[in-house]
Image: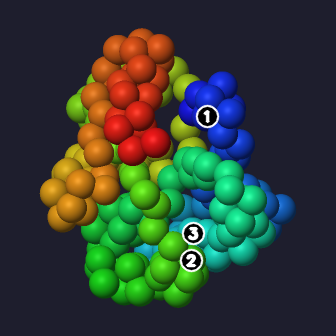
Amino acid sequence: MKEYFLSRGIDAIITPEPGGTELGKRIRDILLDENIDEITPIAEACLFAADRAQQVKLIIEPAIKKGWMVISDRYVDSSLVYQGVARGCGLEPVKNLNEWATDERVPDITIYLDIPVARGLDRIASCEKDRIEKETREFHENVRNAYKTLMKLSGGRIVEVDALGTPESVHHRVVQEIEKIV
């Protein structure tokens, strides 16, 4: 996506979550470590929010002040779904935590790449999996259902894109959605 914006003369930056800052890289190591299976849901939510707070202050706000497009690979909607719903922390507590962590920054659009869980798990079957990817099929079904529900409640800010097909075809569908708002 960054190349898409740059080719149109729009400066852009990608921020991975977690991990876009030095602190975030350490948080990412903890969160995705397959050998750590005892992270409580609340601790997990707080770690993601800590990374996000750091990114907002050090990366996102400075980029926005420069007039850049910011592309986050995950953001608050992910925490609402993963920690709020799938981990059982509750939407309201996770929402409040992340509003505080982000100074209430909300993206203009969230692209939700949808794929049936079985197909998604097949895609990563031969890959080394992190702690979250190793979760049960039921967990991943809960995540998918929660995204679909959150999308309905978002007032159109969250847009579903079919993630089946080649990376090029999926990218094309994402670009079509982005062009509606740029």
Q: Is residue 172 left or right of residue 11?
A: left
Relative height, residue 150 to residue 103 (above, below)? above
Dot 3, crowdedness within 10 Å: few (<14), some or many (≥20)? many
The front one of 119 and 20 is 20
Mark 1 touches mark 2? (CB < 8 Å): no
Q: Is residue 117 left or right of residue 107?
A: left
Q: Amino acid at mark 3?
A: Phe
Mark 3 touches mark 1? (CB < 8 Å): no
Mark 3 touches mark 2? (CB < 8 Å): no
Image point 29% across, 45% down: which residue? 159
* Of labels 1 and 2, the one closer to you: 1
Q: Quadrant of the N terminus?
A: top right
Q: Amino acid at mark 2?
A: Thr
The front one of 161 and 4 is 4
> What percent of the width, then of the height, locates residue 11?
71, 42
Dot 2, crowdedness within 10 Å: few (<14), some or many (≥20)? many
Residue corresponding to mark 3: 48
Residue corresponding to mark 2: 102
Residue corresponding to mark 1: 5
The front one of 107 and 164 is 107
Relative height, residue 120 to residue 84 (above, below)? above
Q: Secondary structure at mark 3?
A: helix
Residue 89 picture quarter: bottom left
The front one of 122 and 92 is 92
Q: Is residue 174 left or right of residue 156?
A: right
Q: Amino acid at mark 1?
A: Phe
Q: Earlier in the sequence, mark 3 or mark 2?
A: 3
Image point 43% across, 57% down: which residue? 108
